[in-house]
Image (spheres, helix red, strand yellow):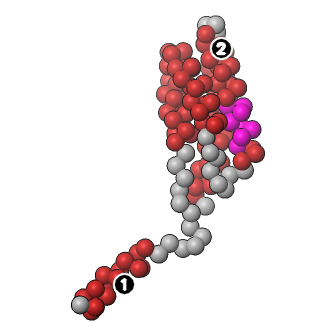
Amino acid sequence: MLKSVAPLLTFLLLFSFVPSGAQEKFEWKEMDDFHTVMSGTFHPSQGGDLGPIRSRSGEMAEKAVTWQKSKVPDGLNKKEIRASLKKLVASSKELDKLVKINADDETLKQKLSSLHDVFHGIKDAYDKKEKM
């Protein structure tokens, strides 16, 4: 019986080994949730369609707050990421206020573009960490 189990045990041992330096990928759900709203509003705005941001600015601000409260993945500069998330929240709330006062399209496009840049600063740092 031992001879028949040996190949299976060897197989399991070989393929269950994880090098000590390997890290498990951290899924940052809150970032992904914010990204869903950002992509659903930013890309249409590039074509002149401000309807999505006008209807989802409050949702974007809420997702930003939720993201700010989430755990920052290990391996990222937490101080820098927290500062960027604080800026993201402030900018999201500012954009929502502009939508509520019916600001002109150009103002909204500029604010959304600036917010997109802040978002990508965080996401790019995360993506770079994940590739290491």
The image quarter containing residue 131 is bottom right
Residue at image x 55%, y 33%?
A: 34
Q: State the image quarter where residue 112 is shown.
A: top right
Residue numbers of the magenta segment: 81-88
Taking 14 as reference, is 117 above or below it? above
- Residue 48 percent coordinates (x, y): 53, 18
Real-space CA distance between mark 2 and mark 1, rounded to the nearest whole angstrom: 62 Å
Residue 123 in the magenta stretch? The answer is no
Tag shown at residue 10? 1
Q: Which residue is the site of mark 2?
A: 97
- The vertical placement of 66 against 22, above or below, is above
Q: Image quadrant for the C terminus?
A: bottom right
Coordinates of residue 10 in the picture (x, y in percent): 36, 84
CB under 8 Å between discs 2 and 1: no
Quick check: can you spot residue 100? yes
Which residue shows up at 56% across the image and 39% down it?
31
Tell me residue 24's x, y (percent): 53, 60
Query: Residue 78 at x, y = what percent?
Result: 72, 47
Q: Secondary structure at mark 1?
A: helix
Return the disc, 2 or 1, that comes first in the chain's sequence. Answer: 1
Amino acid found under the numbered disc labelled 2: Lys
Q: Residue at x 58, y 73 (%)?
A: 20
Query: Residue 82 colored magenta?
Result: yes
Mark carried by residue 124: none
Disc 1 residue type? Thr
As rendered, which of 6 and 113 lies closer to the eye? 6
User: With 83 as the anchor, is 98 left or right in this view?
Assistant: left
Q: Depth check: 16 or 106 in front? A: 16
| Circle 2: element type | helix
Mark 1 neighbour density, 10 Å: few (under 14) some (14–19) many (20 or more) = few
